[in-house]
Image: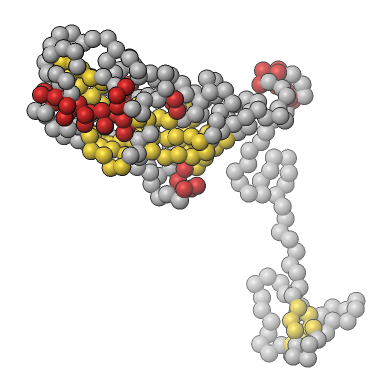
């Protein structure tokens, strides 16, 4: 199945008694039928997206789920004209406020029913007004070498020891990430053995001071690395690789097996006279200055330069 962009591909069920009875396009009451993609609990004020019917959550994220725009349009249609459900829905306030196509807010006490619902939303970031939590949706541009295997990951703090988090699905990205409290740094990586590496520092590359609840697109792709001809398993167990090591230095000038560099010798400077000839200034010991009014005579070959009083 493909990503849902048409509201007509969705169906709805509505309950006002906590899930005992549901109204749908084909019934005014009864149990929840199979194949319903959108379920509204009017008491809990939750919207649940179900992996049923036309809606799936398979990898890659770019080709599954439902767009925020399609979900909003579908709910609008049902609130106004939904068969058997609009009379119920009109007694309640609408759940979504759209900022623009790639951003919306859950309002009037409504929120997603669960993390599965959040994960199924595509092409839009969102804020949940009940909790204040914010989600940005990240969309990768370009293709991955193996969409069913290659898995990207990300960090949300700028540190060599930052914790990494895998994206939910392999392949090309299109999925929400909780960025609550982490809006000033986001870097994505795609690194698989034997393939070219890719990374993207979102805020630096796009000149942002902070990210928010919206969709962001950026390049992230890989391919076969023709310079790699051994597997990690072979490298881990065979010479000459088993005798190799890497030392990482954090202090400038400090290298394992080497002494720190000595301070380079002081170089004499030249000063130009009015007539255009050069005179050499004597190199003085550190921390000393020439006597006031002192001048220097030209240095002859093999002789030491001295100051004249």
Viewer-nearest residue: 285 or 58: 58
Farthest residue in the right direction?
Answer: 302
Residue appearing at x 57%, y 35% in the figure: 198
Residue appearing at x 16%, y 30% in the figure: 80
Viewer-nearest residue: 74 or 135: 74
Q: Does residue 85 appear anywhere in the picture?
A: yes
Q: Whole-percent x and y of residue 182?
A: 37, 39
Res. 177 image quadrant: top left
Q: Whole-percent x and y of residue 142?
A: 54, 34
Where's the C terminus, which quadrant?
Answer: bottom right
Where's the N terminus, which quadrant?
Answer: top left
Viewer-nearest residue: 283 or 61: 61
Q: Whole-percent x and y of residue 81?
A: 17, 27
Image position of 297 (left or right of 55): right
Image position of 158 (left or right of 292): left
Q: Whole-percent x and y of residue 160?
A: 52, 38
Viewer-nearest residue: 280 or 19: 19
Image position of 92 (left or right of 181): left
What's the colour scheme? secondary structure
Q: Does residue 18 appear anywhere in the picture?
A: no
Residue appearing at x 30%, y 36% in the figure: 126
Labels in figure, total: 0
Residue appearing at x 21%, y 31% in the figure: 76
Image position of 143 (left or right of 296): left
């Amino acid at each position: 199945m493909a990503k849902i962009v048409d509201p007509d591909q969705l169906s709805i069920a509505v309950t006002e008694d906590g899930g005992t009875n549901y109204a749908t396009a084909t019934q005014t009451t009864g149990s929840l039928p199979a194949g319903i993609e959108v379920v509204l609990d009017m008491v809990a004020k939750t919207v649940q997206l179900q992996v049923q019917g036309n809606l799936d959550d398979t990898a890659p994220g770019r080709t599954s789920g439902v767009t925020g725009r399609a979900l909003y349009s579908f709910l609008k249609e049902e609130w106004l004209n939904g068969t058997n459900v609009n009379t119920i829905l009109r007694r309640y306030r609408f759940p979504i406020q759209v900022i623009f196509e790639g951003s919306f807010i859950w309002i009037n006490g409504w929120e997603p029913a669960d993390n599965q619902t959040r994960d199924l939303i595509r092409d839009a970031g969102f804020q949940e007004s009940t909790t204040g939590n914010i989600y940005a949706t990240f969309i990768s541009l370009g293709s991955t070498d193996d969409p069913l295997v290659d898995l990207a990951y990300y960090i949300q703090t700028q540190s060599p020891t930052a914790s990494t988090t895998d994206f939910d699905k392999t392949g090309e990205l299109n999925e929400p990430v909780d960025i609550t409290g982490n809006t000033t740094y986001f870097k994505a990586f795609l690194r698989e053995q034997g393939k070219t590496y890719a990374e993207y520092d979102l805020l630096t590359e796009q000149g942002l001071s902070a990210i928010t609840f919206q969709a962001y697109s950026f390049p992230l792709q890989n391919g076969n690395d023709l310079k790699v001809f051994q597997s990690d398993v072979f490298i881990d167990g065979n010479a000459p690789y088993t005798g190799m090591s890497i030392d990482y230095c954090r202090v400038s000038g400090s290298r394992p097996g080497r002494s720190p560099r000595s301070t380079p010798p002081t170089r004499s400077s030249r000063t130009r006279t009015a007539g255009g000839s050069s005179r050499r200034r004597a190199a003085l010991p550190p921390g000393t200055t020439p006597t006031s009014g002192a001048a220097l005579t030209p240095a002859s070959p093999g002789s030491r330069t001295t100051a004249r009083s």
